[in-house]
Image: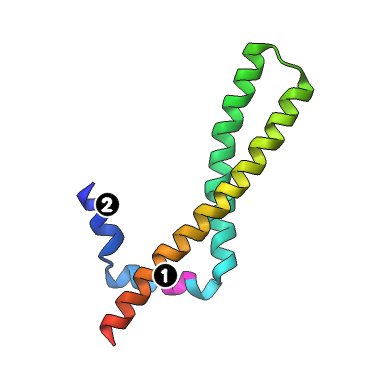
Amino acid sequence: MKKAVKKLFIWTPDDILAWEKIRQQGFWHFVLRSGLIFFGMILFVLTGGITIIANILAQASIANLLFQLVFVGGVCLLGGLFAGLLTWWLEDTIYMKIKKSRS
């Protein structure tokens, strides 16, 4: 845990260069790619799979399953959006503090 926290807040020069490259691609590119596509998709696969298994075991109707998958998909989109926004804010705040301390 200590190593993960240290890695998050103590950046190497390579970390700084990597974030500068990400920043050049743009805010929305990062939020959509990292948040919605990466985090949201993984979240949907996991929760959608659980939803499908639960509906099969409960012998629920197809309409019920589809409604639940649409709902889960919407929640995962919002979760992915939130994760992308939060990650950008955290990473960019750290980056700006590093840049400020070096100037």
Local SS, label 2: helix
Please say if 72 is above or below 92. above
| Neighbour tally class for label 2: few under 14, some 14-19, many 20 plus, Cα within 10 Å | few
| Percent of width and height locating residue 36 | 59, 52
- The residues colored magenta run 18-22
Which SS does the magenta portion mostly show? Answer: helix
Q: Is residue 82 magenta?
A: no
| Percent of width and height locating residue 4 | 27, 52
Q: Is residue 21 magenta?
A: yes
Q: Quadrant of residue 54?
A: top right
Please say if 95 is above or below 3. below
In the picture as drawn, the residue positioned furthest to the right comes out as 63
Q: Quadrant of residue 45?
A: top right
Residue visible at 58% across and 65% down? 29
| Neighbour tally class for label 1: few under 14, some 14-19, many 20 plus, Cα within 10 Å | some
Look at the image and tell me in which quarter the C terminus lies: bottom left
Residue visible at 59% across and 58% down? 32
In the picture as drawn, the residue positioned furthest to the left comes out as 2
* Residue assigned mark 2: 4
Residue visible at 74% across and 23% down? 64
- The disc at residue 101 is none
Q: Quadrant of residue 16?
A: bottom left
The reply, left or right, for residue 19 in relation to residue 35 is: left
The number of discs equals 2
Residues tagged 2 and 1 counted as in contact (Cβ below 8 A): no
As measured in the structure, the alpha-carbon distance from the residue carrying label 2 to the one carrying label 1 is 18 Å
* Residue assigned mark 1: 92
